[in-house]
């Protein structure tokens, strides 16, 4: 008999709807304002939870609950006011301030009941425009990338020529070309051959008249270096944001030289800007000469060829060797602490294997000699010059510490000479890694929590209004079959919500727009099917034959229309960024779920109510 479904299809639909209902339900419970306390690389213990609970009780701050979850302490509150007050109290708690490895972050914790959590059912994330927070657009200084590459290659070439015992006059770089000047023809020929075999990514040209070899950085090498720089910056920024404890941040590349950073729930934008834009790193160098030599160099005296003049924080000059022992790139971990001897703030540093080896060799061979720590910070600042915006790159280099090497050390040691806040920020930056190139914040937008709440309400209202109008239209125009289509449309909304929650996708305003569009598009398939059934009835076919023909003949048209829309959504997701991706995701999910509910779902209901019956007419 026609218009009959086997039992397994009904069971499949029931299973899908039940699972969809379970994973969509957490979104009804909302989220609790909360504070998340975590301890870097360690577990927050029960004793810490008790101490913080007692602190909040003394401060008369009401909490909803506190629990140890995923090695962290999660404290829930009934209001945002209590959340903010509690976060301030906890950050100022001596127990926390003494240990910089603690992170106190504002959060929104799902209020999902335990029985739903046992199924790993969680609500979908809300984007910046719905939750509130701050949006930064950062531009990477690609000119510095090229200059740093030139500087590294110049240093490598000098070292290589010295190791090969090839005499040269000088090595300098400019505009992507490195010029190596030799003393004689023999050095030119030998040096050109050796350099070309060692540095294969460069294009070499000999100029015998001036005894010079020109090494040009190829466009392919420059392109790869720029790509590597922005990828490393994205990774570093992600590490820094994780250190700040921000929940569900968005950090992604935009174009060839820009990075988008969205920090939902962040209210301290000044600190976020300082941490994101900072390019602080360290260099460890041995000193050169005595303090008398330093004073003479400052007053215009000769500076040794193997040394460079720096200044301490108080303005005193100091000569340091050009050879760098260890750089910030070789630091594995760092944490702010207190120096046990002086009681002053310090940063405890742990080096990687390569850095530890170099530090061990240097300290073994230079006991009782001074070693300096150089703090380096690069920034890009936009200034107005003659009515035009001009980008100015600044580089701050200062000696923050000079200490005499008392004995050999390699992997772990302390840096002193810092203020308390400097020690904490420097430790954070060193843990997260240095930026490959300076970044400038070219755009900043702040979305308040109240505006995010309004956006949620308006988005929800738009979905409900569109949904209700479609329901009314379908019932008025298609009667009983319209009711069946409405049931399928409701199931479609549940499935979209369930899939977004399962994926832990981030819902934004454009994502809500995609859902609203899907609500309108979801009934297109049913309209095509129902109109085809009406046409078959007008041709004099029986009710059962008309239903069968309506579903069979309309299928190819429905498939073509939805596949073309799905292709467009996939292209949007592939090429778009941020909000466009959010729209494309909800649209894609909506297309797939609407195909399932509009064709298989409505057909199951039609077969259940009308299949196998002798019908003279149907309500359509």
Image (spheres, rainbow, N blue to C red):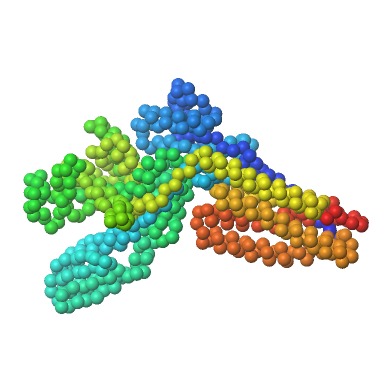
Foreground pick, 423 / 136: 136
Residue 569 higher or lower than 181, as above or below = above
Foreground pick, 593 / 534: 534
Residue lying at 49% horizontally and 38% vertically, measured from the top left:
107
| Residue 388 percent location from the top left of the image | 31, 57
Residue lying at 37% horizontally and 51% vertically, measured from the top left:
441
> Is residue 39 in sight in this rendering?
no
Q: Is residue 59 left or right of residue 221?
A: right
| Residue 473 percent location from the top left of the image | 75, 51
Residue lying at 34% horizontally and 69% vertically, measured from the top left:
219
- In the image, farthest residue toward the bottom: 209
- The quadrant in which the N terminus is found is bottom right
Q: Residue 150 falls in which quadrant of the image?
A: bottom left
- The quadrant in which the C terminus is found is bottom right
| Residue 277 percent location from the top left of the image | 35, 48
| Residue 207 percent location from the top left of the image | 19, 77
Residue 400 higher or lower than 53, as above or below = below
Foreground pick, 192 / 536: 536
Residue 248 higher or lower than 559, as above or below = above
Residue lying at 52% horizontally and 53% vertically, measured from the top left:
579
């Amino acid at each position: 008999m026609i218009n009959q479904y086997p039992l397994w299809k009904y069971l499949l639909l029931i299973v899908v709807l039940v699972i969809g209902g379970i994973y969509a339900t957490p979104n009804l419970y909302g989220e609790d304002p909360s504070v998340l306390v975590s301890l870097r690389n360690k577990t927050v213990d029960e004793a810490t939870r008790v101490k913080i609970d007692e602190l909040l009780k003394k401060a008369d701050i009401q909490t909803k609950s506190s629990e140890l979850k995923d090695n962290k302490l999660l404290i829930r509150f009934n209001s945002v006011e209590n959340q903010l007050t509690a976060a301030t109290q906890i950050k100022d708690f001596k127990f926390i301030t003494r240990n910089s490895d603690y992170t106190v972050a504002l959060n929104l914790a799902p209020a999902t009941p335990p029985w739903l959590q046992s199924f790993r059912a969680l609500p979908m994330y809300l984007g910046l425009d719905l939750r509130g927070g701050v949006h930064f657009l950062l531009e990477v200084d690609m000119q510095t990338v090229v200059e740093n590459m030139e500087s590294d290659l110049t240093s490598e070439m000098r070292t290589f020529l010295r190791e090969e015992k090839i005499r040269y006059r000088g090595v300098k770089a400019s505009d992507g070309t490195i010029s190596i000047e030799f003393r004689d023809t023999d050095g030119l020929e030998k040096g050109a051959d050796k350099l070309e075999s060692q540095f294969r990514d460069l294009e070499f040209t000999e100029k015998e008249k001036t005894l010079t070899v020109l090494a040009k950085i190829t466009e392919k090498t420059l392109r790869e270096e720029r790509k590597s720089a922005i990828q490393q910056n994205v990774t570093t920024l992600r590490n820094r944001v994780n250190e700040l404890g921000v929940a569900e941040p968005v950090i992604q590349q935009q174009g060839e030289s820009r990075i988008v950073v969205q920090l939902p729930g962040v209210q301290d934008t000044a600190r976020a800007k300082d941490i994101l834009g900072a390019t602080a790193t360290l260099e460890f160098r041995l000193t050169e000469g005595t303090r008398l030599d330093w004073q003479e160099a400052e007053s215009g005296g000769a500076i040794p060829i193997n040394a460079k003049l720096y200044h301490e924080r108080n303005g005193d000059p100091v000569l340091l060797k050009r050879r760098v022992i260890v750089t910030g790139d070789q630091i594995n971990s760092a944490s702010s602490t207190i120096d046990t001897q002086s009681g002053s703030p310090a940063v405890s540093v742990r080096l990687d294997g390569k850095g530890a080896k170099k530090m061990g060799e240097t300290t073994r061979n230079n006991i009782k000699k001074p070693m300096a720590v150089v703090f380096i910070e690069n920034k890009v600042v936009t200034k107005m010059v003659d009515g035009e915006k001009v980008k100015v790159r600044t580089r701050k280099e200062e000696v923050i510490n000079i200490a005499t090497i008392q004995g050999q050390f390699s992997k772990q040691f302390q840096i002193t000479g810092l203020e308390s806040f400097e020690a904490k920020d420097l430790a954070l930056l060193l843990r997260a890694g240095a930026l490959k190139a300076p970044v400038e914040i070219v755009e900043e937008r702040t979305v308040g929590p109240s505006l995010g709440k309004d956006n949620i309400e308006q988005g929800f209202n738009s979905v409900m209004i569109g949904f209700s109008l479609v329901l009314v239209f379908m019932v008025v125009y298609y009667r009983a079959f319209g009711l069946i289509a409405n049931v399928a449309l409701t199931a479609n909304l549940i499935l979209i919500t369930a899939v977004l929650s399962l994926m832990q996708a981030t819902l934004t305003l454009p994502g809500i727009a995609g859902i609203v569009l899907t609500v309108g598009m979801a009934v297109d398939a049913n309209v095509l099917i129902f109109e085809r059934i009406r046409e078959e009835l007008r041709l004099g076919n029986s009710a059962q034959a008309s239903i069968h023909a309506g579903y069979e003949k309309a299928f190819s048209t429905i498939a073509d229309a939805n596949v073309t829309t799905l292709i467009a959504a996939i292209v949007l997701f592939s090429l778009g960024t941020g909000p466009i991706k959010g729209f494309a995701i909800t649209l894609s999910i909506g297309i797939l779920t609407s195909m399932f509910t509009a064709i298989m779902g409505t057909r199951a209901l039609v077969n259940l109510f009308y299949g196998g019956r002798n019908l003279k007419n149907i309500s359509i």
